[in-house]
Image (tube, grey):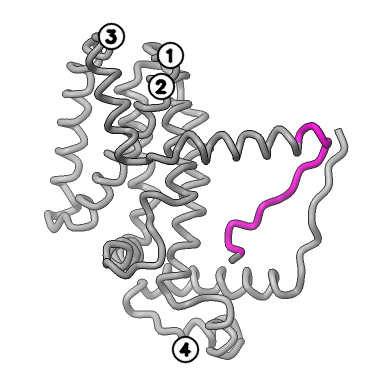
Amino acid sequence: MRTSSKPVSRSDQARQHIYQRAIECFSESGYDAVSMREIAAKADVSVGLIYHYFAGKEDIARCWYSEQVEALAEAMAGLPPGQLADRYRQALELNLRRLRPMRAAMLALFAGAMRSDAAVSLMDSPPGYRLSSAYRQLVLDSDDALREPAARDLGIVLYMFHMLLIVFWLYDRSPGQAKTERLLAFWHEMFKLLRPMFFLPMVPQGLAKLARIVMPDHQRITDSVSAAAQDDAGNGQHENLNIHGQ
């Protein structure tokens, strides 16, 4: 199959360089302690150039979060076989481990996204659709898999709890976020107990209603993404997507 990729422009290279230096600053000094001037010094560029590519530190954190979502989705595809409840807990634990080094940045990002005037929604966003689709695949690949469309609806519901768990974790002030660990263990136990009920007619109906509330445009958006992917495959082409691009 013939493959092609777009050449990386100097502008993209500069943006990626600034982004990488910023993440290094966050890792070394902590998100709250780092200023835009320090990022500029680390990247050896002007503060004005940083603002040309990023609206601020929160924008950089949003790019990092998108990277973590993509990495998590890929890691979920490689989880060992097993029951859905067990694999879901593994996915949630994996997500928290990935986010822990930038917990302060995630707190700022989620707090900003909760404002009424926020420009970006983390729930109903490309990373959100990516993760909900990954959870749908997790359902389909489990030993106790559900059929479509219940698998899609449950994937959205699992993603919803994924986001609720992150919010709980961000505001968890217990040592080492121990309350979050207990909540995760409790949800795992309840999931295993409730899983047999998914075969009852009213449960898939309830999942469908909840999924439409959380992501009403999910089907339309995922269908358009799938159609675009099929067109690319039919043309024998593949593009390397830059998730940090505006």
Q: CA distance from mark 1 to mark 4?
A: 52 Å
Quarter of the figure with residue 155 = top left
Cα–Cα span, label 1 and label 3: 11 Å
* Residue name at image x 58 percent, y 82 percent: 52
Q: Position of residue 201 (x, y in %)?
A: 26, 10
Q: Earlier in the sequence, mark 1 or mark 3?
A: 1
Which amino acid, by three-letter code, is at mark 1? Answer: Arg
- What residue lies at 58% left-to-right and 76% top-to-bottom? 53
Q: CA distance from mark 3 to mark 4?
A: 57 Å
Circle 3 residue: 199
- Answer left or right for 131 relative to 11: left
Magenta segment: does it hold 206? no
Q: Which residue is mark 1?
A: 147
Q: Which residue is mark 4?
A: 37
User: Which quadrant is the N terminus positioned in?
Assistant: top right
Around disc 3, counting alpha carbons within 10 Å, would you say few (fewer than 14), some (14 to 19), or many (20 or more)? few
* First in residue order: circle 3 vs circle 4: 4
Residue 236 covered by magenta stretch: yes
Tell me which segment is drawn in magenta. Answer: 233-245
Q: Position of residue 99 (x, y in %)?
A: 37, 53
Answer above or below: position of 201 versus 112.
above
Q: Which residue is mark 2?
A: 151
